[in-house]
Amino acid sequence: MEVYKIRGGNRLKGNIKVSGAKNSAVALIPAAILANSPVSIDGLPEISDVFTLKLLMEEIGGQVTFENGKMTIDPTTMEAMPLPNGNVKKMRASYYLMGAMLGRFKRAVVGLPGGCFLGPRPIDQHIKGFEALGAKVTNEHGAIYLRADELIGAKIYLDVASVGATINIMLAAVRAKGRTVIENAAKEPEIIDVATLLSNMGANIKGAGTSVIRIEGVEELHGAQHTVIPDRIEAATYMIMAALAGDGIRVDNVIPLHLEAVTAKLREMGVKVEEDEESIFIPKTENLHAVDAKTLVYPGLATDIQQPLCVLMTQAEGSSKVTDTVYSARFKHIDELRRMNAVARVEGNTAILTGPAQLHGSTVTASDLRAGAALVLAGLIAEGETEVRDIYHVERGYSDIIEKLTALGADIRKEVITPASN
Ligand SMILES: CC(=O)N[C@H]1[C@@H](OP(=O)(O)OP(=O)(O)OC[C@H]2O[C@@H](n3ccc(=O)[nH]c3=O)[C@H](O)[C@@H]2O)O[C@H](CO)[C@@H](O)[C@@H]1O
Ligand SMILES: C=C(OP(=O)(O)O)C(=O)O
């Protein structure tokens, strides 16, 4: 089993470069299925979700190269191969194969996705959208079967502003006949990024990034070149790390606008955040104040940053509260932080953390991606050694994390431990 071993207490300094956004990358790659010639995507993060998608593109017959963050996907030889099991289960966003394959082939078989368990994660809104476009959708032994004679544009009101449902419906609707209108669409920057690639492929999409997206279906989509936007969640994680353990850290390759909610919350806690055009500098933080926070859909504070933010709250003077309104059970990290001496508890969909607490190194387990990131941050400020287990979750979303943190002065390494030392 691979683990991270972190010796806490080092002060960190220097520049850290954010990689391309996971939540864009995992939709941009399946979008290539819709083209009739190769699609190239630059700036992709080297994370397991991207490697898994490369395998999935190949499983359905695509020719794929991936070098130095650039993936070129030739979709011309792809077929509507059923994907009921296997790689689709390793990640959440394999659900985008449903929309993209339905758009291109008018049929698909895709196993229900894996990914982070954050409490229930239904895909009913995706399915409602596909059905509205004319697909027959059934769940057979844990795989979703989608079939349509033709896709016809429709008006779809999402009951929840779901990122995945918005993108998935967009992927199918760009090849439907006529106009699709998605109302109460999610507004996350990754949706704009995917719409930009699709538009460059010849799609007709208006309103991405607002709550109403209008799509006029087209007969064909062609190849295109695209560069993925920076990962705002990775950036926010490193901003929090800078506030916890930094003696001056510049986070490079960011779009500050995408980070407004986290920047505001950090400032409220007493962190100095100096924004530049494409970077953010955080000088050494002296005193942290307790705050209350609530996760919301974009442009609110992202649920994906709630778990790392909890670590900062353990270091703030007083009692902080963070309520997760998107995933009410996303608190598995709290028990692990308590093992490290954090003073924290969960009440309903709210975590309450009292600080400042001197964290102690411990053996802890990452229950999901951002819980893992939170435990890495906690390990960096803990007294003694922390061992983080189940790091495969972390590697779904943080490109070169060991190299990036080591370059700032962190004492973190990956080790293989044998079951005997469990
Ligand atoms: C690959 C990817 O982009 N993952 C992100 C995406 O996940 P994902 O797209 O899966 O999350 P959604 O935006 O769909 O989920 C938002 C909320 O809507 C609910 N819901 C969603 C779909 C549905 O059909 N029915 C339903 O009830 C969910 O349970 C959740 O409470 O957005 C989440 C919320 O910002 C982030 O945490 C994930 O990092
Ligand atoms: C929950 C996350 O990812 P996914 O939706 O891919 O599981 C995340 O990125 O924090």
Image (cartoon, helix red, strand yellow):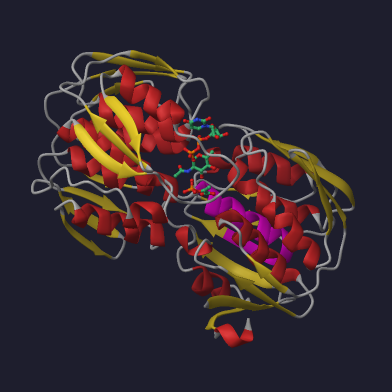
Residue at 23 percent across and 33 percent down: it is: 102
Q: Residue furthest front?
A: 141
Main SS of the magenta part reads helix
Q: Position of residue 129 (x, y in %)?
A: 36, 23
Foreground of the two, 67 or 393: 393
Residue at 59 percent across and 69 percent down: it is: 14
Q: Is residue 335 above or below residue 135?
A: below
Q: Position of residue 325 (x, y in %)?
A: 67, 33
Q: Is residue 417 visible?
A: no
Give the magenta-colored segment's residue range.
232-250
Is residue 55 rendered to the left or right of residue 150?
right
Q: Is residue 365 above or below residue 349?
A: below
Q: Position of residue 359 (x, y in %)?
A: 81, 68
Quarter of the image with the C terminus is bottom right
Q: Which of the 4 quarters of the picture holds residue 387?
A: bottom right
Q: How many marks?
A: 0
Q: Is residue 118 above or below residue 189?
A: below
Q: Position of residue 152 (x, y in %)?
A: 22, 16
Q: Is residue 326 visible?
A: yes
Foreground of the two, 225 or 146: 146
Q: Residue furthest right?
A: 318
In the image, residue 156 lies in the stretch drawn in magenta: no
Q: Is residue 164 above or below residue 254?
A: above
